[in-house]
Image (spheres, rainbow, N blue to C red):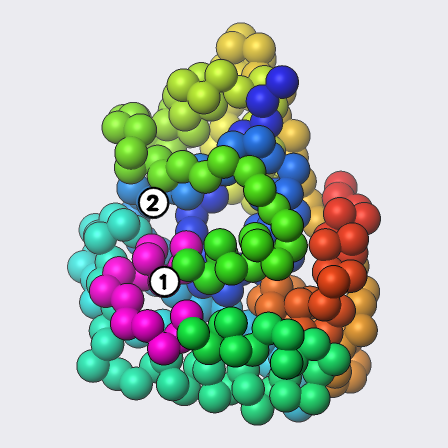
C-alpha cells in the first residue's frame, strides 16, 4: 500500500501541511505549477505578543512564473527581519533554546530560489517531527496536463493506492471517478486544529508549525499525530 500526498512547497507551513506529510509514504513537492501571489508559498503567520504577524519573503516573479523558477529578492534584508521577529516573539517559549539556533542557521544562508528556502525549512521541521517519508519534486517527473489530470498521473506513476488531499481546491477540481477507475482512493483531509500551549494568550490557530515546536518541543509529534481530521 502506497499513500501519496502532493502540495506546493510553502513557507513556514502550518500544521495541516505536516499532518498530510506524516501520513504519506511519498510526498511530492508540486513545484512546476504557477506561483500564486498573496498565498502561503512565500508567506506565513507566527504568533506575536499581541496577536500574529505575517512574515513575507520578497520575490521576483512574472505573472506566469512556475514556483520552481521564482527567485528571492535578496536586495531586501528580509531574512534578518524574519529571524529577529521569530527571536523576539518566541524567546520566552519553553523550547526556544532547543530550536532557535538551528533555525537561525537556515536564515543565515542566502538562497537564490524560493523553493530552496522553503524545502530547507520543511526538512528541518520534518527532522524535528521525525517525519521520514520519501520526498520528490513534480518537476522531476515530467508529467503534463491540467492540475487535476497531472495529480492523477503523478499518483499513477508512483503506484499510489491512496491520495491524501485538502478539501477546498480538490473538492471542486478532482474527478473522483477517474481516481476510482485507477483503483486510487482519495482521502480528503480537513484538520481540526489541536489546542496546545502557546507562550502568548489567547490561543490562536493556524500559525506556522514552528509555533508548535517552540511551545511543545518533543510533544509536538504526538500532538500532530493525535490531531483529528474531518
- Quadrant of the drawing holding the C terminus: top right
Residue 191 drawn above or below residue 102:
above
Q: Say if residue 230 shows up in the picture.
A: yes
Q: Is residue 184 left or right of residue 49?
A: left
- The residue lying at 63 percent from left, 88 percent from top is 91
Whether the magenta-drawn stretch holds residue 23 is answered as: no
Range covered by the magenta-colored residues: 106-119
Quarter in which the N terminus is drawn: top right
Quadrant in the rendering for residue 137 = top left
Label 2, secondary structure: give it: loop
Q: Which residue is mark 2?
A: 31
Asked whether 108 falls inside the magenta stretch, the response is: yes
In the displayed structure, does residue 50 sit left or right of residue 192?
Answer: left
- For mark 1, what is the residue? 117
Which residue is more in the foreground, 26 or 69? 26
Give the numbered dot on residue 170: none
Looking at the picture, does residue 60 appear above or below residue 18?
below
Task: Judge by depth and name the residue closer to the eye, 120 or 85.
Answer: 120
Q: Nearer the viewer, residue 130 or 60?
A: 130
Which residue is at the front of the view, 192 or 217?
Answer: 217
C-alpha separation, residue under disc 1 versus residue under disc 2: 13 Å
SS under mark 1 = helix
* Badge 1 density bin: few <14, some 14–19, many ≥20, Cα 10 Å: many
Mark 1 vs mark 2: which is more N-terminal?
2
Amino acid at each position: 500500500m502506497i499513500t501519496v500526498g502532493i502540495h506546493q512547497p510553502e513557507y513556514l507551513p502550518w500544521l495541516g501541511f505536516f499532518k498530510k506529510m506524516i501520513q504519506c509514504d511519498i510526498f511530492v513537492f508540486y513545484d512546476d505549477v504557477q506561483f500564486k501571489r498573496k498565498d502561503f508559498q512565500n508567506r506565513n503567520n507566527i504568533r506575536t505578543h499581541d496577536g500574529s504577524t505575517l512574515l513575507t519573503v520578497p520575490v521576483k516573479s512574472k505573472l506566469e512564473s512556475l514556483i520552481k523558477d521564482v527567485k528571492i529578492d535578496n536586495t531586501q534584508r528580509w531574512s534578518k527581519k524574519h529571524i529577529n521577529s521569530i527571536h523576539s516573539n518566541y524567546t520566552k517559549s519553553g523550547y526556544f533554546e532547543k530550536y532557535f539556533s538551528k533555525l537561525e542557521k537556515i536564515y543565515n544562508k542566502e538562497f537564490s530560489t524560493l523553493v530552496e528556502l522553503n524545502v530547507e525549512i520543511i526538512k528541518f521541521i520534518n527532522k524535528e517531527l521525525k517525519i521520514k517519508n520519501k520526498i520528490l519534486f513534480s518537476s522531476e517527473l515530467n508529467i503534463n496536463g491540467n492540475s487535476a489530470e497531472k495529480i492523477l498521473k503523478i499518483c499513477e506513476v508512483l503506484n499510489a493506492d491512496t491520495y491524501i488531499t485538502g478539501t477546498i481546491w480538490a473538492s471542486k477540481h478532482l474527478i473522483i471517478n477517474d481516481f476510482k477507475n485507477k483503483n486510487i482512493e482519495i482521502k480528503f483531509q480537513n484538520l481540526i486544529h489541536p489546542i496546545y500551549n502557546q507562550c502568548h494568550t489567547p490561543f490562536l490557530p493556524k500559525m506556522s508549525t514552528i509555533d508548535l515546536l517552540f511551545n511543545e518541543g518533543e510533544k509536538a509529534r504526538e500532538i500532530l499525530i493525535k490531531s483529528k481530521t474531518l
